[in-house]
Amino acid sequence: MPTAPPSHEKTSRPQPYDYRRRELVEPDWRRLPGWREVTAAQWHDAQWQRAHCVKNARQLRAVVGDGLDDKFYDDLAEDQKHMATMAMLITPQMLNTIAPKTPADSGGYHDAFYTDPIRRYMIPVRSDRDPRWPSHPLSSRDSLHEAEMWVVEGLTHRYPTKVLAELVTTCPQYCGHCTRMDLVGGSTPSMGKQRLTLRPADRQTAILDHLRRTPAVRDVVVSGGDVANVSWPQLESFLLRLLEIDSVRDIRLASKALVGLPQHWLQPQLVAGLENVADVAARRGVHLAVHTHANHVQSVTPLVAQAATALLDAGVRDVRNQGVLMREINNSAAALLDLCFALQGEASILPYYFYMCDMVPGAEHWRTSLADAQDLQHAIMGYLPGYATPRIVCDVPYVGKRWVHQAVEYDRERGISYWTKNYHTVIERDDPDALTRRYPFYDPLSTLPESGWRWWERQVTAPRGQACA
């Protein structure tokens, strides 16, 4: 007899992820004592937002009142004194998305703030850090060797047809896990920062001159830092000169400010200027896009959606998100899918990449293993439209972005994966082994079995140059 088709009544097993449309909500900033009298006009003003960024514990207390116990401030002070690689800087917009449903004068604010996923990477504290391995033994301040691949100051040429142009070394807000912590932001007690030496105008001229002489480059990512910290007249001038180069066919503007300071991208003068740039790009057949950086669904608010729509209405072809995969922030299928549905479905922002957190100092508690990243890529498939399903990638030093399933070998006991590549960087043009070499990447040591981290302990304590069996 034929088998009866499966029943689809209420007794059916639930899906691993239960999709429900959730409209975006702007948290009420007036729930925080320091902003009780802030008007809507002030909140929507980009200059007010910049002027009221929180840069230290004293300013944080002024905003949240008695909502946080001294325990939190002691924890914060310990981190800033001994561990922080990025100066504290958070916009009111971003701070308002931490513990968004909890009034600061309620009994639960302290715990809600402490455990909040956005707080964990925007305002890291000492107790967040891995107690045994706060940094991987092979971590590096410039873990992707971007400065090593500068062809002129600030212009990284890692891929055959793509370059990264760093116009500025500041952002409206600083993320604790910043991959450019070697260069971006002010120095901290534990990390003195590198500095660009050329005047901004001279650096831009050098970048453009190199691109004119290098017709193989067709794709330019304009970043920093954050292009929102470049004055618009200066940025517009640079983009218009960039558009005069025939070989440039793609331009991407990198700005976390779309999420952390959407008010910036809603300024009428800036929108009008962007329309001019987009019009020139369209007439030349150049694809102009904006890339932003949202790591958690709480960051995606109606103001973020409004700013993204303004960019698209101005003629920007795409607005895309490049997040970072981080433990206790978004390393679950539900967290990633919630974020992606908010971005794609409610804010017109295309989920694009989630990068495994780079091997920078102090990042071990954020980083995930390659195995976890592979499992997450599997878990999010089939829910979003194919074009809006993000790729989880590993940015392998000296290699570049690779899908997490592209590792050619993976030693899970020691947490070492090996990768290959199919092009030369500018520093390997004469290296005959560049395309056959296997390049390593490393899991966080806390994710290894005991035998694995004990092997690493022996590695760290072994005399320099002596292999460890």
Image (tube, rainbow, N blue to C red):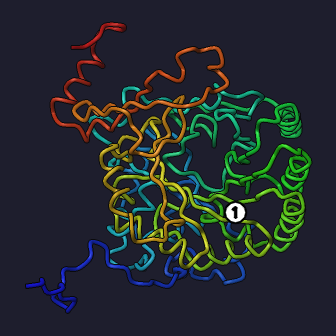
The number of numbered discs placed on residues in the rendered structure image is 1
For label 1, count other residues whose C-alpha is less than 10 Å away and answer few (under 14), some (14-19) or many (20+).
some
118 up-or-down from 414: above or below: below
Q: Nearer the viewer, residue 85 or 365?
A: 365
Q: Quadrant of the C terminus?
A: top left
**Residue 184 placement (x, y as % from top left):** 63, 41
Is 201 placed left or right of 86 in the picture?
right
Is 398 placed left or right of 129 in the picture?
right
Q: Quadrant of the N terminus?
A: bottom left
Is 263 placed left or right of 256 in the picture?
right
**Residue 313 placement (x, y as % from top left):** 77, 76
**Residue 48 placement (x, y as % from top left):** 71, 69
Q: State the image quarter where residue 407 is shown.
A: top left
For disc 1, the marked residue is: 50
Residue drawn at (39%, 60%) of the image: 330
Q: State the image quarter where residue 431 is shown.
A: top right
Residue drawn at (51%, 80%) of the image: 27
Q: Residue type at mark 1? A: Arg
190 up-or-down from 385: above or below: above
Is 94 placed left or right of 409 in the picture?
right
295 up-or-down from 11: above or below: above
Could you tell me if residue 188 is visible in this image? Answer: yes
Query: Which residue appears farthest toward the front when viewing the image?
Result: 1
Residue drawn at (27%, 16%) of the image: 461
